[in-house]
Amino acid sequence: MFVCNYCWFYSVTSSVPTYVTSLPVNTTLLFDSGNLRNCSCSTLVRDCDETLANSMCRCHTVLRSSLSPAQLREPGQLTVWVKELWVLEELLNSSMVGHLWLSFCGIKPVNSQFLALLGLQTLRIHSTAPKASYPNQEIIVSPPAGVAADLEAHSFDFLSSFHMTFLDVAVLNGLSALKVYSVAGPLASAFSQHFPHLALPCSLLYSAFPVTEECYTCTFMF
């Protein structure tokens, strides 16, 4: 029986060009307006420009009291403008997102804490913080070519494995290059044994790993 036990580390060394610091077309946008604004945008909107988003996108308000934690399922493109961390903590944490754009639109620096995401494939971060040395960064969650070949040689299918990502939200401050550390496997049924200090609810583990004898990929971004 194959037991996956590979890991790889890499960092983002180049920033995203300034011309892509606008929303892509046909994307879902969420931002904090006291409650939550949920928008569907079919045209380009500058990051953190709430007035433009309200006028150019189809938006509606969702009461904060009606939000269900960890219920978000967005396999496509999702953009979140962050001023206060409650949007990430109460809506995005432990949810399933395929392609995430995070823009920090606040003033006070963000403290370090981890956000759990399921199925993340690409991440793009934009920061308006005045001291941000890395205001625009993006990364694709996949192993380097050499590691990918080694995984394939040992019958580990990265694309079909279960993916869980832990993102340190302090990266929104833009003070350093985004770093990524990934671990492939062992079996999902042994996840808590190998990561005993990750306080994950059982419901999250079951939703992430419905087949517990499958291998998984756990990625840490900081």
Image: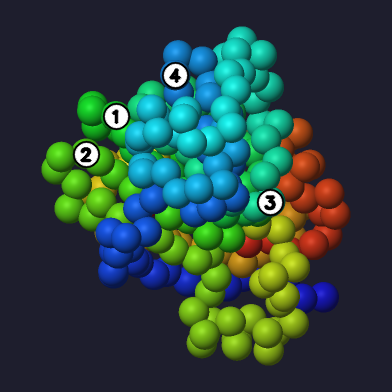
Q: Residue at x 23, y 27 (%)?
A: 108
Residue ID for mark 4: 33
The answer to the question of whether label 1 and label 3 lie on touching residues, with beta carbons closer than 8 A, is: no
Q: What kind of element bears circle 4?
A: strand
Q: Is residue 171 visible?
A: no
Mark 2 and 1 residues: CB-CB less than 8 Å, in contact?
Answer: yes
Q: Which residue is mark 1?
A: 106
Q: Observer-nearest residue: 64 or 10?
A: 64
Name the residue type under label 3.
Pro
Q: Disc 4 versus disc 1: distance between alpha carbons?
A: 12 Å
Which is nearer the N-term, disc 4 or disc 2? 4
Q: Residues within 10 Å of mark 3 (few under 14, many from 20)?
A: some
Q: Which mark is residue 75?
A: 3
Position in image of residue 107 (x %, y %): 23, 28
Element at badge 2? loop
N-term-proximal mark, 2 vs 3: 3
Q: Give the vertical position of 187 relative to 126 (above or below).
A: below
